[in-house]
Amino acid sequence: MAELSAKLEQSAREIVELNAIKARSQAEIAEHGRLIEESESQINQLTKLKQSLGKQLEEAKASLEEESRLRAKFQSEARNFQVCGMAYISHQITLPYEIDVCETCSCR
């Protein structure tokens, strides 16, 4: 009888120990589940940020291309104005009483 009682007590201790292990395992599983949810949320936020930054990059590239195009246009126009202005002054000096048209553009 004492032997059965000892085995019963040993089994009860093992059950308590197994229940404690089970509770710790369930707590760890819950914590890992929470960490997974946080990670997924961060991944979603980073994905949205990446898309936003990609869109901003494309807009910046388009803006840069437009600015470069306009800059080249303005530089060309500035050169034309310099050439036309010099031609106009030259015409005015050599022919003070004639109004002439610059050959490179339509300035007067």
Image (spheres, rainbow, N blue to C red):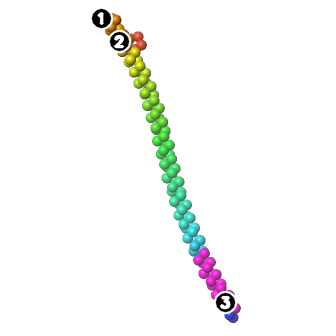
Residue 7 image-quadrant placement: bottom right
Q: Earlier in the sequence, mark 2 or mark 1?
A: 2
Number of residues whose C-alpha sits closer than 10 Å to that of mark 3, classed few (under 14), some (14–19) or many (20 or more):
few
* Disc 1 residue crowd, few under 14, some 14–19, many 20+, Cα 10 Å: few
Question: What residue is shown at x 57% (from left), y 74% (from top)?
Answer: 23
Q: Which residue is mark 3?
A: 6
Q: Is residue 4 left or right of residue 48?
A: right
Q: Compare residues 23 and 89 and report the one nearer the observer.
A: 89
Look at label 2 and name its amino acid: Tyr
What's drawn in magenta, residue-wise? 3-21
Residue highlighted by disc 2: 88
**Residue 13: quadrant of the picture:** bottom right
Q: Which residue is at a point 38% across and 11% down the rendered structure image?
A: 87
* Sooner in the amino-acid sequence: mark 1 or mark 3: 3
Say what secondary structure mark 2 lies in.
helix
Q: Residue furthest left?
A: 97
Q: For mark 1, what is the residue?
A: 97
